[in-house]
Image (cartoon, helix red, strand yellow):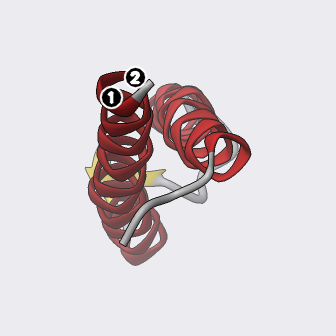
Amino acid sequence: MKLSRPVSWFLLAFGVWSWFIWITFVNNLIKDSSGLAFEDGEPTAYFWVHLLLAVVSFVLGTIIGVIGLRGLRALRRTS
């Protein structure tokens, strides 16, 4: 299957966006001072659930971005 150029760019941009957003989120989660992520210095369930969401999003963002990159590289080879 061939991806169109706009779809490939969208997938690549989605992958980059996912990394940017979730890295920012994890940094904010680690620095949390509201008491949601850490209680008496120990991680809470809130922390672990959101860290798991971030890790899954990193993996999916990477896979989607790689698909977009491979689509763009395939289009370049055929042009």
Would residue 61 be found to the left or right of residue 52 on screen?
right
Q: Residue at x 38, y 76 (%)?
A: 45
Question: Looking at this view, is 5 or 9 the one in front?
Answer: 5
Question: Looking at this view, is 54 or 70 the one in front?
Answer: 70
Q: Which residue is mark 1?
A: 73
Q: Quadrant of the C terminus?
A: top left
Q: Quadrant of the N terminus?
A: bottom left
Q: Residue at x 29, y 25 (%)?
A: 77
Instruction: State the residue lying farthest toward the front.
Output: 79
Bin the neighbour count of mark 2 within 10 Å (Cα to Cα): few under 14, some 14-19, many 20 and up: few
- Disc 1 residue type? Arg
Q: Residue at x 69, y 44 (%)?
A: 34
**In what element is the residue under mark 2?**
helix
Q: Is residue 7 above or below residue 16?
A: below
Residue 50 position in % (x across, y down): 46, 64
Residue 51 position in % (x across, y down): 36, 58
Instruction: Tell me how far mark 2 sits from mark 1, CA to CA.
Output: 5 Å
Q: Is residue 46 above or below residue 4?
A: below
Q: Is residue 59 above or below residue 70?
A: below
**Which label sits on residue 40?**
none
Instruction: State the image quarter where residue 17 is shown.
Output: top right
Q: Is residue 16 above or below residue 68?
A: above
Q: Residue at x 60, y 51 (%)?
A: 35
- Disc 2 residue type? Arg
Q: Nearer the viewer, mark 2 or mark 1?
A: 2
Q: Which residue is mark 2?
A: 76
CB within 8 Å, label 2 to label 1: yes
Question: Looking at this view, is 3 or 13 the one in front?
Answer: 3
